Image (spheres, coloured by chain):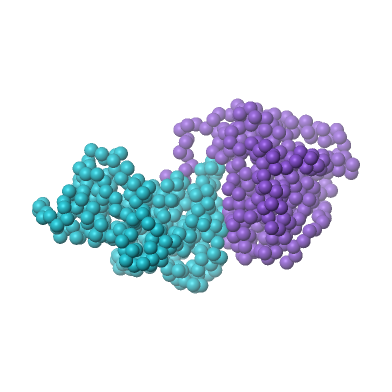
Chain colours: A cyan, B purple
């Protein structure tokens, strides 16, 4: 297995699926001649031509709507929306069309589209740094995927393209250059399966996307204090696979949910609610949430740093659910 | 590219007696179907909103009959007439209005969301303008596969001020897609008159902005509508790209059954009723010796029986099985 970047893993997935299936094509803003604003689609126009790599006007509504219409007749469009912030101008197409096409017409039509988009951001201020996945995770009819590693990114994107339902595929702008092992041979990571990224007996950290990396850094910090954290990566937000989370909680009895979105009404609230509904008796402490503070993202570097969650806050929250005061000695074992 | 008012030229087959009588039958079927639906609504048998196209039957029929069976229709929420003109079973359409399992969308969609895969009738959509990009996407799929199918996209004058209209027509014009946009201009977007909502009230002129031909037609003249739409459909089929056809018409009833019609005078409505497209067409058929009164009376009697049977079918059909509540949310849950 070669170590490749998250960006390269995504490009491999697109390329391999386009080679495998003539029905797969890409459309989006600046994905072709420009090479993709995050360079994921770089080289694909040259390889596949303008028919299958379509540069579009800045028309998010038409991009997603056209993808839906093409999918209804059997194609497999992969639409790129440059950042998740721009999905807001096309949210009608996603929620009122993509999510409803199969149900509202009594199962006659299908909508096998993938909307690739990008969450997160740094030094881009309030409208370009948002983590809006909860908007889509709320909607029956959509599937929502947010991978943390190159391996998962490639396998989940392939699964998304092969899926018969609309999939919102949320990449993270700060993960594109991260590296990880990816096999040469064809594989998929099934949608709707959470994954344990680190084993541990003392506390469960639930995360997805970039927060998995922060959780793993926090777990290493905690290990220095003799605390073994288990890190569960949700990978898919809808359908949400709570199995590995609940199994973990049954062993650790303490949970911190880490999300980069805002705390109120966020993914963390949903995960915490499900844990108390399904594993109340396993809990030795309240479920804690670590998330973005409730402000629009500021531009100034120091303020921005305060607003976003990171490994430090995760460590603190883990110590709190373990009822350990920061700085106090920790018993071994 | 010309954008102009044009006088419709009759097509050779429009002198065919059977065709002319079929047009009359379809228009009369729509009228009686909707009058019976209105009765059922006031009896509480139909819920939600019921948008009638009474007065717009020539626009409904002339548009749809211009298509081949394998062409595609996307329409809006005032679409009983389009569905019936397309040959969808009146009983199954009425059953959908009644929310029954035998309805064209298995009771999931209701009056605003009629659909039939078999008839390439890809749905009525009730977010104004939101379906226009879908039609563009399906036309893109036809271009992608090298098919000669044409997509017909129907919307009202209210839809032309949405962003979706602009994005979709620009994309269609840019990529020369096989789609014909038909605006049924009934002079009101819900209760707001077109001159109170549009800077340019002659909608066909907007085609110039998208490098496509635009044409305005008397929407109450079924033959003029058919001739104009058919010409644009065949133009699209020949690979010459999209067009915009404006049908000027008038709805005799309110926007929906809930409309008290405070925004227009009774005198105005009466003035338009004097140009009832069904009355006009019947007079024309009789005066030109295409059909005598007895023939047309027989058509009407036959339609009456069809509508009776449709209402009976809807009333006697079962509601959807409660066990099927979650069907069709996902293809692969």
Residue drawn 45% across the image and 59% down it: A85
> On the picture, is B298 further left or further right than A144?
right
Q: Position of residue A265 (x, y in %)?
A: 37, 47
Residue drawn 41% across the image and 64% down it: A125
**Would residue B235 be seen by someone viewing this image from the given angle?**
no
Q: Is residue A54 above or below residue B130?
A: below
* Quadrant assignment for the N terminus of chain B: bottom right
Q: Position of residue B207 (x, y in %)?
A: 69, 61
Q: Position of residue B160 (x, y in %)?
A: 65, 54
Q: Position of residue A8 (x, y in %)?
A: 38, 68
* Quadrant assignment for the C terminus of chain B: top left
- Quarter of the view holding residue B36: top right
Q: Is residue B187 above or below residue A152?
A: above
Foreground residue among B144 and A167: A167
Foreground residue among B214 and B100: B214
Residue drawn 45% across the image and 69% down it: A37
> On the picture, is A179 further left or further right than B110?
left
- Quarter of the view holding residue B212: bottom right
Q: Is residue A265 above or below residue B7?
A: above
Residue drawn 47% across the image and 31% down it: B322
Foreground residue among A220 and A269: A269
Q: How many circles with numbers are drawn on the protein?
A: 0
**Would residue A325 be seen by someone viewing this image from the given angle?**
yes
């Amino acid at each position: 297995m070669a170590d490749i970047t998250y960006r390269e893993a995504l490009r491999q997935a697109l390329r391999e699926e386009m080679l495998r299936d003539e029905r797969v094509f890409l459309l989006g803003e600046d994905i072709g001649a420009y090479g993709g604003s995050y360079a994921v689609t770089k080289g694909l126009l040259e390889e596949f031509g303008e028919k299958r790599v379509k540069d579009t006007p800045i028309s998010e509504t038409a991009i997603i709507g056209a993808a839906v219409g093409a999918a209804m007749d059997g194609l497999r469009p992969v639409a790129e929306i440059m950042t998740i912030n721009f999905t807001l101008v096309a949210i009608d197409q996603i929620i009122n069309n993509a999510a409803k096409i199969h149900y509202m017409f009594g199962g006659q039509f299908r909508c096998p589209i993938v909307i690739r988009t990008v969450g997160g951001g740094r030094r881009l201020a309030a409208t370009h740094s948002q983590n809006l996945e909860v908007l889509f995770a709320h909607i029956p009819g959509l599937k929502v995927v947010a991978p943390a590693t190159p391996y998962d990114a490639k396998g989940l994107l392939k699964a998304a393209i092969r899926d018969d339902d609309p999939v919102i595929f949320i990449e993270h702008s700060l993960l594109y250059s991260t590296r990880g092992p990816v096999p040469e041979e064809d594989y998929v990571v099934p949608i709707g399966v959470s994954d344990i990224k680190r084993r541990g007996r003392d506390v469960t950290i639930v995360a997805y996307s970039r927060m998995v990396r922060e959780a793993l850094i926090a777990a290493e910090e905690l290990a220095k204090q003799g605390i073994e954290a288990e890190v569960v990566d949700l990978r898919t937000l809808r359908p949400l696979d709570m199995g590995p989370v609940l199994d973990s909680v049954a062993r650790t009895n303490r949970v911190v949910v880490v999300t980069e979105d805002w705390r109120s009404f966020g993914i963390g609230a949903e995960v915490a609610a499900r844990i108390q509904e399904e594993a109340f008796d396993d809990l030795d402490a309240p479920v804690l949430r670590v998330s973005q503070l409730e402000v629009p993202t500021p531009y100034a570097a120091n303020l921005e740093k305060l607003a976003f969650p990171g490994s430090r806050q995760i460590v603190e929250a883990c110590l709190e659910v373990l009822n350990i005061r920061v700085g106090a000695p920790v018993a071994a074992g | 590219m010309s954008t102009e008012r044009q006088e419709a030229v009759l097509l050779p087959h429009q002198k065919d007696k059977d065709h002319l009588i079929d047009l009359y039958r379809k228009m009369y079927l729509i009228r009686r179907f909707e009058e019976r639906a209105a009765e059922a609504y006031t009896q509480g048998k139909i819920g939600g909103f019921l948008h009638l196209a009474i007065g717009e039957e020539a626009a409904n029929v002339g548009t749809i009959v211009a298509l081949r069976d394998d062409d595609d229709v996307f329409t809006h929420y005032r679409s009983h007439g389009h569905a019936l003109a397309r040959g969808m079973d009146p009983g199954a359409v009425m059953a959908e209005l009644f929310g029954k399992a035998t309805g064209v969308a298995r009771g999931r969609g209701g009056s605003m969301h009629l659909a039939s895969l078999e008839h390439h009738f890809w749905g009525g959509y009730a977010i104004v303008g939101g379906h226009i990009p879908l039609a563009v996407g399906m036309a893109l799929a036809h271009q992608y596969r090298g098919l000669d199918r044409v997509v017909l996209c129907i919307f009202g004058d209210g839809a032309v001020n949405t962003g979706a209209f602009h994005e979709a027509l620009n994309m269609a014009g840019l990529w020369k897609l096989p789609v014909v946009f038909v605006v049924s201009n009934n002079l009101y977007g819900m209760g707001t008159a077109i001159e109170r909502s549009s800077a340019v009230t002659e909608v066909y002129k907007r085609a110039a902005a998208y490098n496509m031909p635009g044409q305005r037609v008397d929407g109450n003249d079924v033959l003029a509508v058919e001739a104009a739409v058919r010409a644009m459909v065949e133009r699209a089929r020949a690979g010459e790209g999209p067009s915009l056809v404006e049908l000027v018409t008038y709805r005799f009833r309110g926007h929906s059954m809930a409309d008290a019609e405070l925004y227009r005078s009774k005198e105005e409505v009466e003035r338009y009723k004097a140009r009832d497209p069904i009355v006009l067409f019947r007079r024309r058929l009789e005066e030109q010796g295409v059909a005598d009164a007895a023939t047309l009376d027989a058509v009407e009697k036959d339609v009456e029986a069809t509508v009776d049977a449709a209402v009976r079918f809807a009333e006697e059909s079962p509601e959807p099985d409660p066990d099927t509540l979650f069907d069709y949310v996902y293809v692969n849950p």
